[in-house]
Image (cartoon, rainbow, N blue to C red):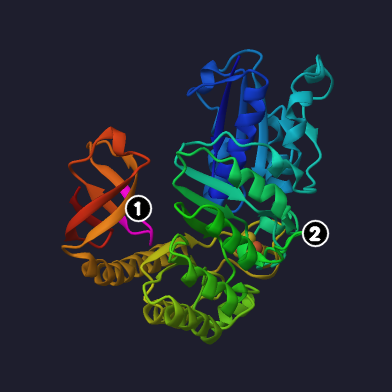
Amino acid sequence: MNYYIKYYGCDMNRSDAERVSSILESLKYKKTSTMESADVIVVIACSVRQGAVDRVYGIFRKKKLKKNVIKILTGCVLKEDAQKQQKLFDIIIDITKIKSIPKLISIPPWRNKQKTIYNYKPENVNYLDIKPNHSNNFSALVPISNGCNQFCSYCAVPYTRGIEKNRSAYSILKEIKKLPKSVKQITLLGQTVNSYISPDNTSDIKDFGDLLEKVAILKPNIWINFLSPYPTKFDDELIKIIAKYDNISHHIHIPLQSGSDKILKMMNRKYSSSQFLDIVEKIYETIPDANITTDIIIGFPKETEYDFKETLNVLKKTKTTLVYSGLYSPRFETLAYKMYNDNVSQKTKRKRDEIMTKFIGKQSLMRNKKYQDKIVKVLITNKNKKGEYLGKMQTYETVKIFNGHDKYIGQFVNVLIDKCLEWGLEGLE
Ligand code: SF4
């Protein structure tokens, strides 16, 4: 019996896919790379972006699936999207209930009685205790919480994953202690990862800073990253901890979303552009080599050229080197969907995105130039179709090497940089 998993969206969904995979393998299902050969297909969907939602509708089109295949929908899914996609799937469950997959797929003749089990209500984070089946052996995603309390007006997450639930520090550390020796990099995951508060009464770990420090001490030779933080949750203590340990990455991804105070307010982000600048300034004061990257939503309702320029202004002042940009698309249930018209045209959104990409490219090149003729440590992550090897520095710069070897994938390699570009660096091992 075979299973096939398709996930969309962010690292949290990827991490969830690793847990679903582990459940199915415990039932002796084997992973397959084609839907056609699968007996169980699991789609871990993402309602956060319209593009990702649209892709699910066509997922089985022109596919000759097995007659008795069981199709499961889970992930970060809004109720409205799940309802619309109901016809495509046999089982729809929220991600916090994936432990019930073995029972659900084993009840004969469940399909005749009730085609779709529909009870989408995120609960606790016990599902995070499932031992994941890591998608590669050198990089481990470790979720520490699920859900979000921020209710940014555009965001579906508080409705798809529910309010924030923190995982026991004991359970997190247990998972980390058991990671295979081949793991070179750990990423602590949460929707607002740095708002973590341990639910354990007995633990000496109280907040995210304590947890990060503990992990850094526990795994001194492993690079430690975290995603995604909320700007105002970067307190002085946390910044000092990041600076104190060599193995904690100095890549700071700090989502700005917009540089306009008017738009930030409409987004229900709980900071102004000047507060954001103060936080980044503190980060640079304590961590001078920090590599700042961010998320920006382009074309939020009522975003004018002036507002967009304000965003570029903040990106300039923060010397941001990479932006994960998303063109605004209204999501059901969210406040922005109910309150504002999506009044910025797609053409304008795309034009602003292009301008921003060019702008960021220049800033990235400026930072990258400092590595010219330097030797940098790189974790090689993959080989592209041209046979070149790609990897990341601890500060997240992409490095391409031309004289690599398959055995380097998943290993640290010292690279002499001979070319600095906007997208990254090139060199020889
Ligand atoms: S902080 Fe805002 S954007 Fe991030 S997951 Fe929570 S609600 Fe969504």
Amino acid type, label 1: Lys
Residue 329 lies in quadrant:
bottom right
Q: Is residue 305 visible?
A: no
- Residue in the image at 62% along x and 30% along y: 22
- Residue in the image at 26% along x and 42% along y: 389
The local secondary structure at tag 1 comes to strand
Residue 196 in the image: state x and y as whole percent: 68, 63
Amino acid type, label 2: Thr
Query: Which mark is first along the chain, 1 or 2?
Result: 2
Which of the two residues, 107 or 195, is positioned nearer the viewer here? 195
- The crowding category of the residue bearing disc 2, from other C-alpha atoms within 10 Å (few below 14, some 14 to 19, many at least 20), is few
- Residue in the image at 51% along x and 21% along y: 32
Residue 164 lies in quadrant:
bottom right
Residue 223 in the image: state x and y as whole percent: 45, 54
The verdict on label 1 being within 8 Å of ligand 1 is no
- Residue in the image at 54% along x and 58% along y: 217
Name the mark nearer the viewer: 2 or 1.
Answer: 2
The residue range painted magenta reads: 391-398
Residue wearing tag 1: 392
